Amino acid sequence: MAISASDAKYIRANHFSAIGRFKRSLSAATIAAGLLLTCCIAAAQDTPNSALLVISKREHALAIVDPSSLKVIAKVPVGNDPHEVTASADGHTAYVSNYGSGAYHSLAVIDLVRHQPLTAIDLGALTGPHGLTFVDGKVWFTAEGAKVIGSYDPATSKVDLVLGTGQNRTHMIFVTPGSEHIITTNVSSGTVSLIDKEAVRMPGPPPGMTPPAGTPRPPQGGPGPRMDWNQTVVRVGNGSEGFDVSPDGREVWVANAQDGTISIIDRQNKSVVQTLQVNVTGANRLKFTPDGRRVLVSSLSGPDLTVLDAHTHKVEKRIPIGHGAAGIVMQPDGKRAFVACSPDNYVAVIDLNQLTMTGKFEVGDEPDGMIWAARP
């Protein structure tokens, strides 16, 4: 079909007009993409070297909070029923326990720089992971369903140690640098496990028994010592859950939720030296201030944060913070503490000099476990 001169002119005009619109559209899209990339880069650059990490149990997320502005920088999904969180020594990675009261068996892994979830760690038969800490390049955890503590090595992607406690609900965990001493609370047993790596001498073969062919001859006097783990179980109070070790390493303070008491264990003698009647029924977490002067105790059954004098063992103050609280974390400089007020869906900010609640911020429903993450 023949096209007239006027039609041809119209087609050419619309053709170039369409090209112009396409170029303008492409340019706008390019600019928008560039702005988005710039914003992402700026956001990554704005992430502080020190951050507060807070679990939101109901949202199944980890909130990364700027401690200077108390603003949430990012939220990262962490799987079902998250309870506790720890961070690697370089501040690049976080690990979250998926608890499920023994139904789950994984640790969520989060890239704190890119704000992304990584491949979770499947613990297999080690069910009910809860308490976490990061020591000597490894993730240490409790597993309530299996009644054990264990360690996971990120360098080899393997669980490289499992130790049974024989206690019910092995819940929270503390590991000393060098990984020679481990402390756990066992909630339903009302006990604390003090686990120490010690040299033990292994006996030789029974008298008259001939070793199998090819077995190296033991040195005179027996095979000699080797390192092994020994557990001392200390009876404290009912519902022993939150605990902390004094900064000088001499004492373990344990909050007994059902009894409303605090047991003080002498680590050298491995025995309870005092039980404080301080009315902390429902106690969830217990933490020393960095200077060792005070002890903070949260309770899911009461409105107050209890502050104890670590030297006199007396209640110094009860700070109203809401309708109950769980996780506690100290700012490293000792100026503030942060307390997860789970029933009220906010985190309370505590001035440790004035012993007052100075503010609060939201990270998501039912905040719980918290940790401070710092990059060198």
Image (cartoon, helix red, strand yellow):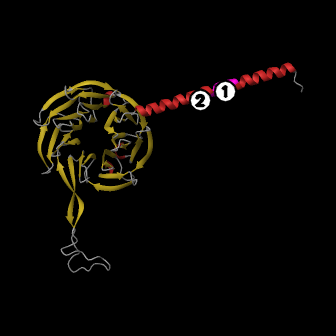
Q: Amino acid at mark 2?
A: Thr
Image: magenta residue range: 20-26
Residue located 12% across and 38% down the image: 276
Mark seen at residue 23: 1
Dot 2: element: helix
Quick one: 48 or 371, which is closer to the camera? 48
Which percent across, then down, holds residue 17? 72, 22
State whether residue 239 appears in this view.
Answer: no
108 vs 175, nearest the viewer: 175
Name the residue nearer the viewer: 43 or 179: 43
Compared across the picture, whether 366 is left or right of 225 comes to right
- Counting from the top left corner in percent of width and height, residue 373 is at 33, 39
Is the residue 346 above or below the residue 142 in the image?
Answer: above
For the residue pair 58 and 115, the one nearer the viewer reads as 115
The rendered magenta stretch, by its main secondary structure, is classed as helix
Q: Is residue 82 magenta?
A: no
Q: Amino acid at mark 1?
A: Lys
Question: Relative to residue 277, is residue 134 depicted above or below?
Answer: below
